[in-house]
Image: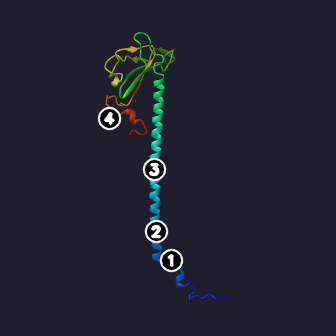
Amino acid sequence: MSTFLHSGSGRPSRRDRGFTLVETMVTLLVMAVVMVVIMSIVYAISRNKAATANRIESSQGARVAIDLMSKDLRSAGYGVDRDSPSQPPIAYVDSVQVLINEDLQPFPDTTSILWVVQPGTPQAYNPAGNPKPFQFAGTAWTPSRKFLTGAETIRWTLDVNNDGVIDANDIAGTDAAKTQNPN
């Protein structure tokens, strides 16, 4: 048979009551250091994940753009005016843009407005004319000759704001501002 010794008041001895204030403070300090380390690791992982997602999204966007351009370049010259003077498949190329002629809306090339057929709407420009097309906005630049047989001119350019220069102002252009990441 065992006997337990208690103090006269019925309370456990001083050693058996719990943690001291110093022990509690040391434990809290150790836990705070552990939490800071864990939070810094989680933050670094989160930043890395966001950077990777941005890189993947940029790659996918570039792939889509290249697919669209290659589709248009492959079909350049389809349905163009072959009469004299003939309409060239690749109308104009420089360091910032490519203009190609192709018939995106083949025969009968019509536009329906209120169920009334309007033939011959698309028009393409003559690349032999001047000025050259860096100002390809209908009012600022009007081509010297238009081909009227149905092939349209498609323009791929890096000059978003049509000023003839690739610079920081292109980021502020209307088309660039419409993108999810205009930088």
Query: 124 and 173: which one is in front?
Result: 124
Tag 4 secondary structure: loop
Q: Secondary structure at mark 1?
A: loop
Name the residue tied to disc 2: 30
- Tag 3 or tag 2, which sits nearer the N-term? 2
Disc 2 marks a residue whose amino acid type is Val
Type of residue at label 4? Asp
Earlier residue among tags 3 and 1: 1
Q: Position of residue 64 (x, y in %)?
A: 48, 33
CA distance separating discs 3 and 4: 30 Å
Q: Where 15 sits versus 43, above or below?
A: below
Q: Are marks 4 and 1 in contact (CB under 8 Å)?
A: no
The residue tagged 3 is 48
Which corner quadrant of the image does residue 167 belong to?
A: top left
Q: CA distance from mark 2 to mark 3?
A: 27 Å
> Nearer the observer, disc 2 or disc 3?
3
Element type at marker 3?
A: helix
Which residue carries the number 4 mark? 167
Where does label 1 land, which residue?
19
Q: CA distance from mark 1 to mark 2?
A: 15 Å
- Mark nearer the viewer, 3 or 1: 3
The answer to whether residue 77 is left or right of residue 4 is: left
Q: Nearer the viewer, residue 22 or 98?
A: 98
Amino acid type shown at disc 3:
Asn
* Colour scheme of the picture: rainbow
State which tag comes first along the sequence, 4 or 1: 1
| Residues at marks 3 and 4 touching, judged by CB atoms closer than 8 Å | no
**Earlier residue among tags 2 and 4:** 2
Kindly indicate the quadrant of the structure image that contains residue 136: top left
In the figure, 137 relative to 24: above or below? Answer: above
